[in-house]
Image (tube, helix red, strand yellow):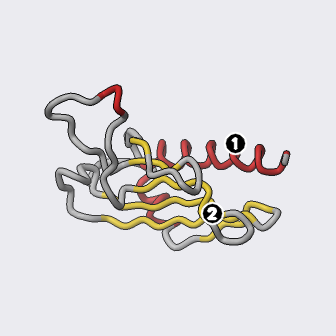
Amino acid sequence: MIDDAGLQNLLDLAGSVIDQGEDYWVKIEAWSVAPSLNVPHGIRYALTLHEPYGKRILGYDNAHAVKPPQKFKFAGQRLTYDHKHRHASDQGVPYTFSSAYQLLSDFFAEVDQVLKLAKLK
């Protein structure tokens, strides 16, 4: 497992459902695993933002592989497992995991952006 000061914070948040106001909510799942080729940092996670009727509208996870963007297609390209879903029907785009702290920071910054846009409508 990686040495990451934010890792314990992420693991402490595991199982949390966090109210975001106006019936929007965040769910955090995270657990330690043995490092592997697909999960070199040794942490499995799913961070999701849900709209009032329960549908996921944003998610960061590493539950499945995603294809790299077409512009990066070349022989030997490794599929990434760390990715984000930018809306309900997004199949996922690669996310560069650098630390648990940065993951939480990136996720909650994007939650703020999504909620700001949602509440303007």
Q: Residue furthest left?
A: 76
Three-letter amino acid code of the residue under disc 2: Val
Q: Number of numbered discs present? A: 2
Q: Secondary structure at mark 1?
A: helix
Q: Which residue is mark 1?
A: 113
- Residue 26 numbered mark, or none: 2
Tell me what residue is drawn at x 33 percent, y 58 percent. 64
Q: Secondary structure at mark 2?
A: strand
Q: Residue placed at 51% from the left, 50% from the top? A: 90
Residue 9 sits above or below residue 70 on the image: below
Q: Residue at x 57, y 71 (%)?
A: 16
Quadrant location of the N terminus in the rendered image? bottom left
Horizontal and vertical percent position of residue 121: 84, 48
Label 1 is placed on what type of residue?
Answer: Gln
Name the residue: 37% across, 67% down: 31
Quadrant position of residue 30: bottom left
User: Crowdedness of circle 1 by 10 Å Cα count: few (<14), some, many (20+)?
Assistant: few
